[in-house]
Amino acid sequence: MNILIIYAHPEPKSFNGALKDLAVLELTALGHQVKVSDLYAMNFKALADRNDFQLLENENFLKYALEQKHAAKTNLFSPDIKEEQEKLLWADFVIFQFPLWWYSVPAILKGWFDRVFASGFVYSRDNRYDTGRLKGRKAMLSTTTGSPIQAYTPFGMDGDIHEKILYHINHGMLYFAGLEPVEPFIAWTPSHNEEDRKRYLEEYKTRLHNLSKIPSIPYHPTSHYDEHHQLKMEYR
Amino acid sequence: MNILIIYAHPEPKSFNGALKDLAVLELTALGHQVKVSDLYAMNFKALADRNDFQLLENENFLKYALEQKHAAKTNLFSPDIKEEQEKLLWADFVIFQFPLWWYSVPAILKGWFDRVFASGFVYSRDNRYDTGRLKGRKAMLSTTTGSPIQAYTPFGMDGDIHEKILYHINHGMLYFAGLEPVEPFIAWTPSHNEEDRKRYLEEYKTRLHNLSKIPSIPYHPTSHYDEHHQLKMEYR
């Protein structure tokens, strides 16, 4: 497979860095093609603004999503955006490696979604979720937390990790774009001790060796919703 | 009241810009003190990195949250972070004005949370949620969407706006820091027509005149959770 790793951490010696390094090593050894976007090392621009387009359709009023649509048609995204989009089209599987900061992705990775997941490129009015333009590719979040697993259970203090925390990423970003999100890999508070880190690296290695067998998150296809965007009765 | 508006949109003439301008106008006329952080105009740095600290505790290994704690003790955050923190301490009420991009805040605003909501400043081990350091202040999200309200209902295609989408912001960011989040103001697909925009501006004006009466979101205080971070049986 062609595997793309989007990696967002400011410290190469961090545990996130170790997970990324392990993935490159193991996946390459298994015969996969691997590319890494190391967003901090690339000094990836996080801010969505008019400089993201080589030519603006409307110089006087920046409607970001409309300019994205225009740039997708004319192939006039800024070079750093194009490069990431080409990597996405190349990939069969995308891994996102990041620390969970404020119950979401770090700003540099949010900026990657804001800019690279462009209207007209990953979605359009008729292409979203199971018909999103990145259809046919899988994706997995690999993240680290600052709170223990208990805090993220359905009655946990921080909120259910799948239903309340990662939903806006797995469903809202990955699935929306047509990617098929598989169950995330989560290292709970790995900063607390060396034993845990070793165990997580072992677990992650096992997972990397079984990438194609990770269960997908069972989101509904768009056909399960009616014309008012409501889940049809038979699927509730 | 002292009211701080954190505003994140790249186009001053946008509807988000109009909502921000209206808030400044109305709140000032009502006799409030108003400050605005216009993140795009400030070219606010979104990336959390080692330059956020005037002196590093550990030059060789950047642990961002530990450096935040150190900077909070020594008052050695970078000047742009300090300035935002001082505005927060000054404020009684904070309004966040932003477009909902990828079911979350734009990267520039996420960077504001990553950098300004620092460990040792808004939270510590014993100060989070109802005991967070920004306690005594209220906060409100004011946002605009690209999908209609139906898509955000409990069985809607995009996911329940309160429980699945805004939860990571209202609960995870605002409430975690001790702020008391009130019900958000949401303009659904305001880009679609002028009539809707006019109506939303009227509705927002009414709301701005009644800021202190907006119901708070009823999140549980930390005392409702047991030592395993689980909501106690009697509160379920």
Image (spheres, coloured by chain):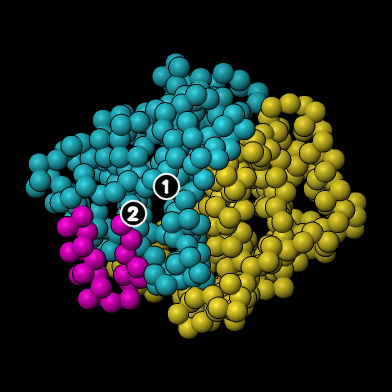
Chain colours: A yellow, B cyan
Say which residue appears at 76% left-offset and 66% top-offset: A92
Callout 1: helix, strand or loop? helix
Q: For the view shown, which residue lies furthest in the right direction?
A: A30
Whether A201 is drawn above or below B16: the answer is above
Is the C-beta separation of discs 1 and 2 under 8 Å? yes
The residue where tag 2 is placed is: B184
The residue that label 1 is drawn on is B170
Magenta residues span B185-207
Q: Residues within 10 Å of mark 1 (few under 14, many from 20)?
A: many
In the rendered view of the protein, which quadrant contains the C terminus of chain A? bottom right
Residue B114 percent coordinates (x, y): 48, 39
Q: Is residue B228 above or below residue A59?
A: above
Q: Position of residue A234 (x, y in %)?
A: 60, 79
- Magenta stretch: dominant SS? helix
Residue under the image location 45 percent in, 66 percent down: B152
Q: Amino acid at mark 1?
A: Asn
Q: Is residue B186 magenta?
A: yes
